[in-house]
Amino acid sequence: MIRAIAVDDEPPALRIIERFAANVPELNLEATFTKPGEALDFLRVHPIDLIFLDIQMPSVSGLHFYKNLPGEPLVIFTTGYGEYAVEGFNLKAVDYLLKPFTEARFVEAVGRAQDTMDFKAQQANGGIQYISVRADYSVNKVALADIKYIEGLDDYLKIHLENAKPIVARMTMKAMVEMLPPASFIRIHRSYIVPLARISMVRNKHVFIGDVKMPIGGSYEEAFFKVF
């Protein structure tokens, strides 16, 4: 899921982005802003993957705004002025949407953002995309991207997957941690390993992945918050 916001001083432009975003399952448009300052306050608290960013705004240029952002979110510039395209791409923008843009063009830009995120994840993982897990007298090829979370059950592990039945394997949590890329997965409790990218919220020392709530163990708390 791509976590995104949109920043544009024109409310009609934001409504168009909201309408198009609602039809893209892999995109979660978390908030929209007409004031860049309010967007910046939001970004200081909420991690975001992607920003749809207007360039021509009265209070600040979108190009200047992006140069001073905390973190390194991806950006898709949206503007009615084509002359800014070169400078936008010099800032390594994922795409540049010239208003008025179609829904098909919007979906194409989101696809480019997803491809960029996937490529960065592979680099962070050292190119690892799958692990092999023995279960039910066979070897299962498990895509890292499909893992929702891993649950420890005594001498067994239950690997919860996206759109598939869980895999129950006889192995230790320690062995599983050693198989997974540390840049993408972290152990938060003696009974839970989670992919960082799937965490939707952390509250009161609990991690939420969708509707699933998991505790952060005392001995894992410091390491978790250093990474998250």
Image: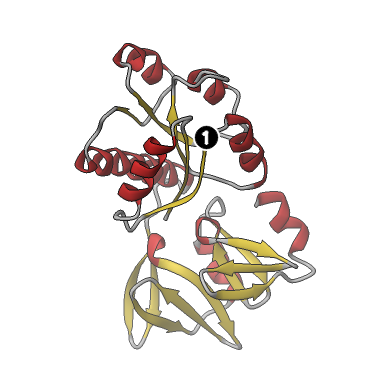
Residue ID for mark 1: 34
In this view of the protein, which residue sits in the foreground, 134 or 103? 103
Which one is nearer the viewer's eye here, 142 or 134? 142
SS for tag 1? loop
Residue lying at the far top in this picture: please name it: 83
Pinpoint residue 202: horizontal percent, then vertical percent.
66, 62
Residue 151 drawn above or below residue 58: below
Relative vertical location of residue 142 with respect to residue 122 in this rendering, above or below:
below
Position of residue 132 relative to residue 8, above or below, is below
Please state which of residues 115 and 16 is positioned toward the viewer in this rendering.
Answer: 16
Which of the colour schemes (rainbow, by chain, secondary structure, one colour) is used? secondary structure
Q: Is residue 114 left or right of residue 176?
A: left
Q: Number of marks in the image?
A: 1
Residue 195 shown left or right of residue 77 in the figure: right
Q: Quadrant of residue 187?
A: bottom right
Q: Residue sitting at 49 percent across and 84 percent down?
A: 170
Question: Residue 61, image x and y in percent?
Answer: 51, 18
Report the amino acid beneath label 1.
Answer: Thr
Residue drawn at point x = 29 percent, y = 16 percent = 82
Q: Is 38 left, or right, of 18 in this rendering?
A: right
Q: Quadrant of residue 164?
A: bottom left
Residue 1 % position (x, y): 42, 56
Q: For the residue carrying disc 1, how many other residues have a C-alpha within 10 Å: few (<14), some (14-19), or many (20+)?
A: some
The residue at 36%/14% (across/down) is 84
At x 74% / y 67%, what residue is drawn?
205
Relative image position of residue 169 (x, y in whole percent): 45, 82
